[in-house]
Image: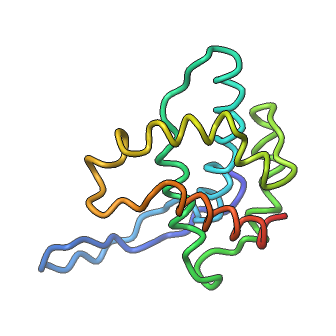
Amino acid sequence: MLLPAPHRPVTHGYEEEVAVAIRTYSLEEIAAEKLRTTQQTRATLLERGWSRSRARDFYDLWHLVRLSSARLAWPAVRSILPAKCALRAVEINNVEDIFDPIVVEAVRKSWERSLGPFIGDLPPVDEVFAELRAALDAWMF
């Protein structure tokens, strides 16, 4: 971890109140990890010819770019991303690296299968890609 782990309250959908806070990864740390996995996945696909689905990473990133800048500081993500990548011997220099055709095709193929059973109103993968690409291009590169 490169950023402090904040204490956040535990939230749940039950009626009783739970006054508990736990240490968590920061949203910036999570975003940097999710971005880094795109290049790790590319390397794995090139090396082995297969990789487990990364659809969840793109779905999670899509949710993260939809948060307000008060909740997630993209400059902090940008500042730690090179160190995160270096730990796994990968690089991300621009938004095209994140949307590498090999990774995009693998995510596209597994989108419905890996996320559909868990997400009732799953958005189309190409809409997620477009919104995510535009946001990352504006905030990260």
Spot occupied by residue 46 in the image (x, y as percentages of width and height)? 70, 21
The residue at the point 13 percent across, 78 percent down is: 16
Residue furthest top in the image: 48
Q: Quadrant of the C terminus?
A: bottom right
User: Is 52 situated above or below 66?
Assistant: above
Q: Give the residue displayed 48% in from the left and 62% down from the top.
A: 23
Using residue 89 as the reference point, say whether residue 27 is left or right of it.
left
Q: Position of residue 64 (x, y in %)?
A: 56, 67
* Residue at (44, 58) in percent of width and height: 124
Location of residue 18 (image quadrant): bottom left
In this view, the residue in front, 56 or 100, is: 100
Q: How is the image coloured?
A: rainbow
Residue at 67% from the left image edge and 33% from the top image edge: 102
Disc tally is 0
35 relative position to 57: left or right: right
* Above-or-below relation of 117 to 130: above
Q: Residue furthest left?
A: 15
> Which residue is nearer to you in this view: 92 or 130?
130
Q: Position of residue 49 (x, y in %)?
A: 61, 17
State the image coordinates of residue 54 (x, y, percent, origin top left): 52, 40
**Is 47 located above or below residue 57 in the figure?**
above
